[in-house]
Amino acid sequence: MKMKKVIAALLALTMVALCFAACGSNSDTTGSTNGEVTLKIGGSGPLTGDYAQYGNGVKNGAQLAVDEINAAGGVNGIKLEFDLQDDEGTQEKAVNAYNALKDWGMKLSIGTVTSDACIAFQGEAARDNMFLLTPSATAVEAINGDNAFRVCFSDPNQGVASADYIADNNVAKKVAIIYDSSNSYSSGIYEKFVSEAKVKGIEVVTAQSFTADSNKDFTAQLQAVKSSGAELLFLPIYYSEASLILNQAKMAALEIKYFGCDGLDGLLTMANFDKSLAEGVMLLTPFAANATDEYTVNFVKKYTEKYGADTMNQFAADAYDAIYIIKAAMEKAGITADMSSSDICDAMKTAMTQITVDGVTGTGIHWSADGEPSKAPKAVVIKDGAYQAL
């Protein structure tokens, strides 16, 4: 009988120990890791697949900033933790990533890298009143809700800025367009470009579309462009499709100017891509690695030392700035680690309209309550396999 009591007591103690162990294994939302006060920042992006250059650039750029901030003592005495989940650029996996990050203890978010995925991710964040600052999702819908902001220009702003640059600098009078009608990023830029082109006196001589199901063979679209008499081909698309278009345009002996937006950033770091095909391509992008300003020089040096140059693109620069923008807003708002994610969000969305930030992707950047940044657009041209400022 005594032995049975001893065994029962031991079992009871074991169950208590297991209970405490299980509790300790749950994500720590109170912000304590290894004796340090921490705050977790989460996001998602395509770390694999066609747009992995974007996602890995964002992951590395954000982590670089987090490491620098932590080494300097953190934010308001809080150390930052960062995790970027792979969503492959899809809405379903972005939602899965959001839920996983909530379980992990995320209290702030950089949203997602691409627009379609961010629309879904932001929908979840808005319901939870979770603060979100996306580095690179450009669709208007990607920051619906007063909890969401962005570092990059929106699709409409890119479309308008592209038309303005082409017109104001006499780049071309007759323009052809190839765009992805199944993608909100591409179609959003296209629509605003066409509208602004009319205002600026640019003639859109042909507009050719494709979808995600027909994004390999552009023979028909390029033939239409060649027959249109266009002086310039506008490509508001991602670099993977642009690389195919440039290659097929060469085979079709199409001699024309090219102009794109930030989605083309990644061409020069694509594996097995002939960089000579991109010679002379112009694009709007807030980042050129050979720029001589202090912010860019320091970023390029630190990024290449840690990650190399393969994923050092505009997306990496946007993400690097995003973390420092979050830091500035946290300091302005007086964020503490014991605050709930909803209380953090309420404080951050007010602070975002009160801060001005200088960074790699712009100086004097500030935000309106609708989440949109105010900064000057930049254009570059690809020359000798590198970006040159225009």
Image (cartoon, grey):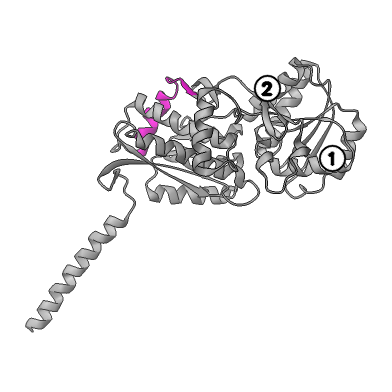
Q: Quadrant of residue 35?
A: top left
In the picture as drawn, the residue positioned furthest to the bottom comes out as 1
How far separated are the C-alphas under marks 2 and 1?
25 Å
- Against 353, is 273 above or below? below
Residue carrying label 2? 161
Locate residue 281 relative to residue 352 in the image: left or right: right
Q: In the rendered image, which quarter contains the N terminus?
A: bottom left
Amino acid type at circle 1 is Ala
Density class for disc 2 (Cα within 10 Å; few <14, some 14-19, many ≥20) is: many
Residue in the picture at 66% in, 49% down: 50
The secondary element bearing badge 2 is classed as helix
Q: Is residue 283 above or below residue 16?
A: above
Can you say whether 42 is above or below 23 in the image? above
| Residue 209 placement: quadrant | top right
Q: Is residue 330 left or right of residue 272?
A: left
* Residue 285 position within the rendered picture, expressed as x and y whole percent measured from the top left: 63, 29
Name the mark nearer the viewer: 2 or 1.
1
> Which element is circle 1 on?
helix
Magenta stretch: dominant secondary structure: helix
Q: Position of residue 346 (x, y in %)?
A: 38, 30
Q: Amino acid at mark 2?
A: Ala
The question of residue 343 being in magenta is answered with yes
- The residue drawn where x is 68% and y is 48% is 271
Say whether disc 2 or disc 1 marks the residue closer to the N-terminus: 2
Give x and y (percent) for residue 298: 49, 29
Disc marking residue 249? 1
10 Å neighbourhood of mark 1: few (<14), some, or many (≥20)? many
Q: Which residues are magenta?
A: 341-358
Q: Quick check: marks 2 and 1 in contact, CB under 8 Å?
A: no
Q: Residue furthest right?
A: 227
Q: Residue 290: which disc? A: none
